[in-house]
Image (spheres, rainbow, N blue to C red):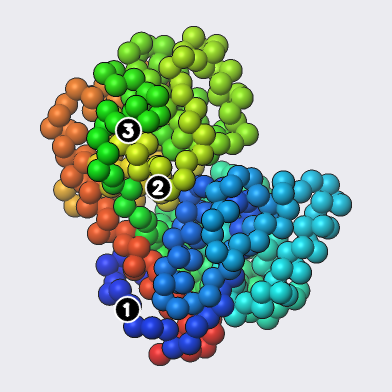
Amino acid sequence: MSAIGRVEALAPVRTAAPAAPVRVLMVQTQAENAGAQEISRLLGRELERRGHEVHHLFFYRRTAGADRLPHVVHCMTERPSGIGGLIRLSVRVAGAVRRIRPDVVLTFQHYGNIVGAPLVRLVSSAPIIANQVSAEGVTNRAIRAADRLFGSLGLFRSVTVNSDDTARAFAGHPAAYRARIVQVPHGFEDKTTDVDRATARAGFGLPVDTPVIGCAARLHPMKRLDDAIRLLPGRPGWTLALAGQGADHDRLAALAAEQGVADRVRFLGELDPETLGRFLAALDVFVFPSAAETFGLAAVEAAQAGVPVVANRLDVLREVLAGDDGPAAVFVDTTDTDAFARAVDGVLADAALRGRLVAAGRRLAERYSLGAMVDAYERLIDEALGRAG
């Protein structure tokens, strides 16, 4: 257990109405359906249900993933580039914050923290709660230095981390920074569906009678989906279904063609949260070869939905997918193609193993309660506004 302040997932869920409605602004880099955006979507929805007013601000609109959110602002239609683009973004972010006049601001992702927080402070005195949901592998030294400086100087009222492994990454930070850290495990929404496997596969055009493995993730090199593609030449009966979008699409498609498996790699694009449950129902095994995570929400969602998981041997995934009666995943070095394939083979061939994985996965709903996560953020908001009782 980390020495950092922790909010337990099974803490009592607050049901009383808030002392007074709070106007909450959530600031993120890009609008899309991905892990950080799913957390802010769920948190915003639940805070709204508790009587608060929630606004979402995105630096730019990568996909339509946030279009249905209430009170949403996309500052740019595409990722800003060059000095001119950054100036326009800064002006638009500052203008939106002035118009919204938030009582408290939650920033997500590394640029949300180091770009969004200073821009908020230029035009608003609202306390800022920063969320560390970007793995160290996707940030550079300058980003980490800026984050360390801003947190140490008090720009962030609180800093949330979502796992023990992520908390350890801040062990060497100054005491002034570490004093602001609170550990809040992610909560999530049950993606279980009543749709049977054959129907789910038909809906995505996937084969009905042969093994289908899959992953839901941004198409980004850090997700190492190429490791999953490399499984297919040695397993001619398998199909790989990938749900997600991103800049790595063309490279992955080229690799599939090079490996002679393009017809068995299905790029399904970005799926909304409702459709994701049907995607999971279509899979025999969820594979998760990611090189770096702060939590691994997609793997947790898959396991809890009853899909056996084979995941990369990351400390953070071992932590979040652990269970009292055994882990909710099989862990393997996914860069070792033969070992990765054998691990998936083992799950496909062993009904007892699949049963243990599914049972352990189902219990994750208790460990990562959505209500407890929202309670934790509501307490942080109350503390930031000086009204904690």
Q: CA distance from mark 1 to mark 3?
A: 36 Å
Do the numbered discs 3 and 2 sit on residues whose CB atoms are within 8 Å? no
Between marks 2 and 1, how big is the CA–CA gap?
26 Å
| Residue at 51 percent of width and 47 percent of height | 34
Q: Amino acid at mark 3?
A: Ala
242 to the left or right of 304: right
Q: Of the residues under marks 3 and 2, which one precedes in the sequence? A: 3
User: Would residue 24 appear left or right of 349 to someone viewing this image?
Assistant: right
Residue farthest along the right direction in this orientation: 84
Which residue does the image show at 58% across and 28% down from the upper left?
249
- Upstream in sequence: badge 1 or badge 3: 1
Q: Position of residue 67 (x, y in %)?
A: 58, 53
Name the residue beneath numbered marker 3: 200
In front: 210, or 164? 210
Instruction: Give the residue drawn at x 31%, y 52%.
Output: 190
- Position of residue 288 relative to residue 327, above or below, is above
According to the picture, the residue beneath numbered tag 2 turns out to be: 274
Asked if labels 3 and 1 touch by Cβ distance under 8 angstroms, the answer is: no
**Which is more foreground, mark 1 or mark 3?**
3
Q: Residues within 10 Å of mark 2 (few under 14, many from 20)?
A: few
* Number of marks in picture: 3
Look at the image and tell me whether residue 272 can be seen. Answer: yes
> On screen, 305 above or below 36?
above
Q: Position of residue 304 (x, y in %)?
A: 28, 47
At label 2, which amino acid type do we have?
Glu
Q: Which residue is mark 1?
A: 15
